[in-house]
């Protein structure tokens, strides 16, 4: 029976994936960086004696030192605490944004692929329209319409990510539609919805999972860009994009740490997600090809 | 095959790297700016909005107007401590070579020069003066000043004589005439081109410069008017570049690529002063920065709440940490350099206990939450907001900051519904009547915080028609005392106007409006 065969196969697959992933060194480095930022951000309250918005926690504009590892800003706020607090917002924004893109993009792509015909055409043409806009410009437009704030940034980045996921799911669905197990399902009298949800989507998951990890990195960058131009987090919230924007004017006067550390945070966290995504792709794709 | 490919690849990469080493084409302007003593390049922060004298209101637009147009009269200049400054108390002839005032102070008769020629070639006559005043009265912006100056009627007596009658004696009249809003316009040329809308992007003046080109997103070029009736400017060309990033302006100035830069951030003054070849002109001015609380929106309709806020502001910190000494204390709604200023009735200091006490008395022992709108573009506004927010948090008051781009910010506050905001103001006419009239009387067009006190309005109206300056100043003093008590605003500070100049750039004269008159400048 199709059910039993699929679940046994998925269990074997999962164990195999895990082992392969652990062996991928770059992927583990990526995972390590992500873990560093996640754990650091979540537990910063325990690690740091300073508050993220505590003005005059130290001397104004002081360079990195023993008591302030990342230095202080023009209000005397400890930069390390602020960078990790900002990590909370960035990671959370990434998660929510990707979740929105997935929740809307995958079903749309699946329906478009499975139904085909004019429904599929209409849906995919709408996705094409969204894709035609430079993503940052589209995010700016959405965030500006919703009003400045972290939640607007999350929604904006989420919307911008929908077409990509729809396209991937669409492509996967089109190819999977032709497979025997779909024909078998139809022969058994399963409804289209059941076929899409129970058989097509699980098999289409691999590229979607890979795209999600890469999407996290991209979401963090776009959210920082929105905050940089003032459409995301508002003062005095610590957020990487806002901190770089505020620190811009201090670069030529020599206070390099104000932009360096948030910039480093963005760069390393995106790198982490990209490395993990690459590793996942290496692990998942070949397996997919060898499965019947 | 493989080896050849490697060599080709190396050659391509090397070639690409070498192209990066060549001189940047964009820097070619640097040489033009420094050669020749007749060209000046300046860095401004905004690109300007219009060339129409009757509608211009921002520094850049006003700069173009003053370069391309003349006025009936103008301010005298003087030297104070070796620095040139405007003497706004003394009005000297410009297009009008002389004038007489009637005994009851309501009729002014101006005799015009007979050698003033517009840049179009048309001679300036009394018809143009009358026509210009008509355009002013019909405009959106300058019409308010027309009313404030008390102008009743403008008539041409003959080709070179104009009579202006006032509704009542008005001490502001002669002070307002030198403003850019009251420029004399070539009305024949405007007629030919279809009316006032044409003035937004074209000039019709008689001034020392022509506006050769203007692109609000990059730069404008002013060229000397060779047929100017007055003293020829030393400068032949003025390039005004619009650089929105403050640190870029500072960079350009310290590298010598511009000879003049406006809107220098306070934190860069110290390093600029130490830079070879750069002079920083920083002078106290009547430009004020205030924290406005909307008197129509709770809880700011409660006077004690507003007073409580005024006791929670860290005044010293704002002056030292944010403005780094490039500002001074603000003690009244009127600037300290304005005649008639008084700090009476203002007891606000940084005292969190007193603030908490007032809040409790007002009925908010646990504090409250309010919305604050922050206009972008000024680093010090943003820094002030964060510091004030931190202090208010200590007395239980939560201030939610929302950033807004400058254009939207200006629109938003003009709806009179914004709960609180920071804004700055310069009274181009350094007079409390002008200042209070626009900002704090019930009908004031810039009274966005809805301050409304009938007694203040009455005092202001009385002073507007009072010819004796001492009596006037006493009335304005009483109005200020009431305002200081009722605290519609918290007073943050009075700015210094900071202008960065290349050594050898001479002639900068400081005016209350902060606008540079390029006809006075020269480059050595």
Image: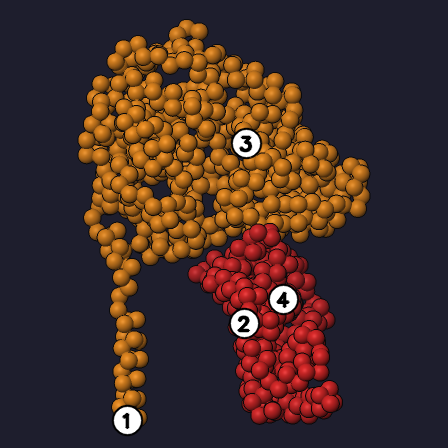
Chain colours: A red, B orange
Distance in Å between CA atoms under marks 2 and 3: 53 Å
Q: Which residue is mark 2?
A: A167
> From the viewer's perspective, is residue A271 above or below residue B57?
below
Distance in Å between CA atoms under marks 3 and 4: 47 Å
Q: Residue at x 56, y 84 (%)?
A: A281
Q: Is residue B36 left or right of residue A37?
A: left
In primary-sequence order, the first of circles 3 and 1 is 1
Q: Mark 2, chain letter? A: A
Q: Mark 1, chain letter? A: B
Foreground pick, B140 / A81 = B140
- Residue A271: where, in percent of width, then height? 54, 77
Q: Which residue is mark 3?
A: B446
Distance in Å between CA atoms under marks 3 and 1: 77 Å
Q: Is residue B349 left or right of residue B245?
A: right
Mark 4 is surrounded, within 10 Å at the Cα level, by few (under 14), some (14 to 19) or many (20 or more) other residues, namely some
> Marks 2 and 4: same chain?
yes
Q: Quadrant of residue A197?
A: bottom right
Distance in Å between CA atoms under marks 1 and 4: 50 Å
Tags 3 and 4 touching, CB below 8 Å = no
- Residue A233: where, in percent of width, then height? 60, 58
Front label number (2 vs 1) = 2
> Marks 3 and 4: same chain?
no
Distance in Å between CA atoms under marks 2 and 1: 40 Å
> From the viewer's perspective, is residue B456 above or below residue A226?
above
> From the viewer's perspective, is residue B67 above or below residue B372?
above
Q: Mark 3, chain letter? A: B
Tags 2 and 1 touching, CB below 8 Å = no
Tags 2 and 4 touching, CB below 8 Å = no
């Amino acid at each position: 029976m199709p059910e039993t065969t699929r679940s046994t196969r998925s269990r074997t697959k999962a164990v195999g994936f895990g082992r392969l992933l652990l062996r991928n060194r770059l992927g583990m480095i990526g995972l390590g960086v992500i873990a560093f930022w996640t754990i650091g951000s979540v537990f910063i309250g325990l690690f740091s004696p300073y508050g993220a918005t505590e003005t005059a926690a130290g001397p104004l504009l002081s360079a990195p030192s023993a008591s302030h590892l990342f230095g202080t800003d023009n209000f005397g706020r400890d930069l390390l605490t602020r960078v990790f607090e900002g990590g909370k917002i960035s990671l959370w924004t990434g998660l929510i944004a990707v979740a929105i893109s997935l929740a809307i993009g995958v079903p749309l792509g699946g329906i478009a692929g499975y139904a085909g015909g004019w429904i599929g055409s209409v849906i995919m043409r709408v996705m094409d329209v969204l894709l035609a806009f430079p993503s940052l410009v589209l995010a700016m437009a959405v965030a500006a319409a919703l009003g400045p704030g972290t939640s607007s940034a999350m929604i904006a980045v989420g919307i911008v990510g929908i077409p990509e996921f729809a396209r991937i799911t669409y492509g996967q669905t089109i190819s999977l539609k032709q497979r025997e197990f779909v024909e078998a399902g139809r022969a058994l009298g399963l409804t289209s919805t059941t076929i899409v949800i129970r058989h097509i989507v699980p098999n289409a998951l691999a590229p979607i999972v890979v795209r999600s990890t890469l999407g996290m990195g991209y979401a963090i960058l776009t959210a920082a860009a929105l905050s940089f131009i003032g459409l995301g987090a508002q003062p005095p919230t610590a957020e990487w994009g806002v901190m770089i924007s505020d620190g811009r004017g201090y670069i030529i006067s020599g206070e390099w740490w104000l932009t360096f550390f948030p910039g480093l945070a963005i760069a390393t966290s995106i790198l982490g997600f990209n490395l993990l995504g690459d590793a996942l792709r290496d692990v998942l794709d070949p397996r997919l090809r060898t499965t019947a | 095959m493989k080896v050849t490919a490697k060599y080709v690849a190396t050659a391509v990469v090397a070639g690409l790297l070498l192209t990066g080493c060549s001189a940047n084409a964009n820097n070619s302007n640097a040489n033009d700016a420094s050669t020749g003593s007749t060209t000046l390049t300046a860095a401004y922060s905004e690109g300007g909005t219009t060339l129409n004298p009757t509608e211009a209101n921002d520094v850049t637009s006003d700069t173009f107007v003053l370069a391309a147009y003349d006025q009936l009269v103008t301010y005298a200049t003087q030297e104070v401590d070796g620095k040139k400054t405007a003497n706004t108390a003394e009005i000297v002839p410009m297009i009008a070579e002389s004038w007489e005032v009637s005994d009851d102070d309501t009729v002014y008769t101006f005799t015009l020069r007979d050698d003033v020629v517009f840049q179009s070639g048309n001679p300036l006559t009394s018809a143009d003066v009358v026509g210009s005043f008509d355009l002013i009265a019909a405009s959106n912006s300058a019409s308010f000043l027309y009313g404030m100056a008390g102008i009743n009627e403008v008539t041409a007596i003959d080709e070179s004589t104009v009579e202006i009658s006032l509704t009542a004696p008005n001490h502001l009249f002669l002070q307002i005439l030198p403003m850019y809003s009251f420029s004399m316009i070539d009305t024949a040329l405007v007629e030919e081109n279809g009316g006032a809308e044409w003035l937004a992007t074209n000039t019709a003046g008689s001034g020392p410069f022509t506006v050769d080109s203007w692109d609000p997103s990059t730069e404008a070029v002013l060229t000397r008017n060779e047929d100017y009736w007055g003293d020829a400017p030393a400068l032949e060309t003025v390039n005004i570049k619009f650089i929105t990033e403050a640190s870029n302006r500072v960079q350009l100035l310290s590298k010598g690529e511009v000879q003049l830069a406006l809107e220098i951030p306070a934190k860069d003054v110290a390093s600029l002063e130490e830079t070879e070849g750069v002079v920083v002109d920083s002078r106290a001015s009547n430009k004020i920065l205030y924290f406005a609380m909307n008197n129509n929106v709770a809880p700011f309709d409660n006077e004690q709440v507003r007073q409580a806020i005024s006791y929670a502001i860290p005044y010293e910190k704002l002056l030292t940490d944010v403005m780094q000494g490039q500002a001074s204390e603000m003690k009244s709604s009127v600037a300290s350099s304005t005649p008639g200023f008084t700090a009476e009735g203002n007891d606000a200091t940084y005292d969190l206990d007193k603030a908490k006490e007032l809040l409790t008395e007002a009925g908010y022992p646990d504090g409250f939450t309010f919305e604050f709108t922050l206009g972008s573009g000024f680093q010090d506004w943003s820094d002030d907001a964060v510091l004030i927010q931190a202090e208010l948090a200590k007395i239980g008051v939560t201030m939610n900051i929302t950033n807004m781009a400058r254009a939207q910010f200006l629109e938003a506050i003009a709806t009179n519904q914004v709960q609180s905001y920071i804004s700055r103001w310069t009274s181009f006419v350094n007079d409390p009547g002008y200042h209070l009239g626009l900002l704090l009387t019930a009908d004031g067009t810039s009274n966005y915080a809805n301050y409304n006190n009938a007694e203040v309005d009455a005092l202001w109206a009385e002073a507007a028609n009072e010819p004796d300056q001492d009596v006037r100043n006493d009335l304005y003093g009483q109005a200020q005392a009431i305002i200081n008590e009722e605290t519609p605003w918290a007073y943050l500070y009075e700015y210094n106007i900071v202008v960065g100049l290349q050594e050898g750039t001479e002639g900068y004269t400081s005016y209350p409006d902060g606008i540079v008159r390029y006809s006075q400048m020269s480059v050595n």
